[in-house]
Amino acid sequence: MEDMTRATLDKAPADVSRMFDAVAGRYDAMNRVMTFGMEPRWRREVERAVGARQGMRILDLAAGTGASTAPFAKAGAATVACDFSAGMLVEGRRRHPGLTFVAGDALRLPFRDETFDVVTISFGLRNVASVEGALRELGRVARPGGRLVVLETATPPARPMRFANRVYTGRVMPRLARILSSDPSSYAYLAESAADWLTQPELAAAMRAAGWEQVAWRDLMFGVVAVHSASRPAEAAH
Ligand SMILES: C[S@@+](CC[C@H](N)C(=O)[O-])C[C@H]1O[C@@H](n2cnc3c(N)ncnc32)[C@H](O)[C@@H]1O
């Protein structure tokens, strides 16, 4: 029973979307607990990097329940929340009736080339089957000169913090999930995928390989998470 909804590190799209369907109802509350209330601070860094304002077109990919999307719409930008989990979309529409939610897969986005000024993805990229494929798709739908902002788990550069983080994600998080979540096996996947995820320089290299330039990142909470940003070349060949 326990493994019915969890995904594996193959990140097969059907498994990942089914897993998020299963946790959608309690996702926001779990997020708050699992991040010890740090999540709003991390989201503010993303908001700063995105710089949403009226007249701007923004795509929030892997938007989930829309918690990562809502601030951009609030700032007046024309904002689209895109996700491939039907359960997350239902929950998102319930929580944020004013937001535009669109069903779509990161590897085949349902948008025309050069649609958005800024494309962003929070805690989504490490769940896609092809990181480079998703980064290229994001580049396709961003306008020339448009920007990319990625919030994702990261590797703390300092060894003691790296150790503490490994203990937290590997041991504490799955236990917390067993107590609090209706679907603890999903959180075991989320911990495993965080441990298996790219370091900050590796993600920066993947972004460059996918055609993004001016790649930079900022570590938050000693590198437990990081915000990467990049620009699409003004005259890009795709
Ligand atoms: C951890 S949640 C993050 C949600 C939200 N961005 C946030 O910060 O709270 C990851 C989301 O990524 C979505 N996702 C994973 N792989 C995807 C893909 N290939 N295409 C679209 N959405 C995807 C999942 O359905 C899930 O809603």
Image (cartoon, rainbow, N blue to C red):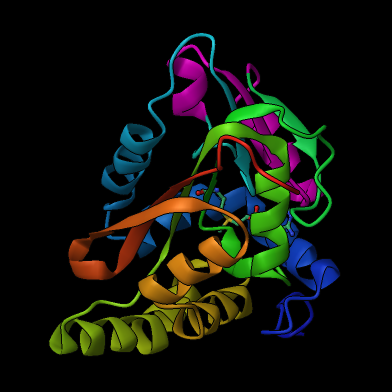
Q: Residue 33 falls in which quadrant of the image?
A: bottom left
Question: Which residue lies at the image location 44% right of the left edge and 66% below the top edge?
Answer: 204
Question: Which residue lies at the image location 52% right of the left edge and 62% below the top edge?
Answer: 208
Q: Looking at the image, is 173 positioned above or below residue 104?
A: below
Q: Nearer the viewer, residue 175 or 202?
A: 202
| Range drawn in magenta | 70-98
Rendered-image quarter of ligand 1: bottom right
Q: Position of residue 145 (x, y in %)?
A: 53, 33
Left or right, 235 with respect to 192, comes to right
Q: Nearer the viewer, residue 6 or 41?
A: 41
Q: Is residue 182 visible?
A: no
Left or right, 129 with respect to 182, comes to right
Left or right, 104 with respect to 216, comes to right
Left or right, 160 with respect to 223, comes to left
Q: Nearer the viewer, residue 47 or 30?
A: 47
Q: Looking at the image, is 219 positioned above or below residue 67?
A: below
Question: Which residue lies at the image location 14% right of the left edge and 88% below the top edge?
Answer: 160
Q: Position of residue 220 (x, y in %)?
A: 24, 58
Q: Nearer the viewer, residue 26 or 227?
A: 227
Q: Is residue 95 magenta?
A: yes
Q: Looking at the image, is 86 positioned above or below residue 1?
A: above
Q: Dividing the image into 4 quarters, which one contains the N terminus?
A: bottom right
Q: Position of residue 117 (x, y in %)?
A: 57, 27
Q: Is residue 5 visible?
A: yes
In the rendered picture of this protein, how many numbered marks are placed on residues?
Answer: 0
Q: Position of residue 237 (x, y in %)?
A: 72, 47
Q: Is residue 112 magenta?
A: no
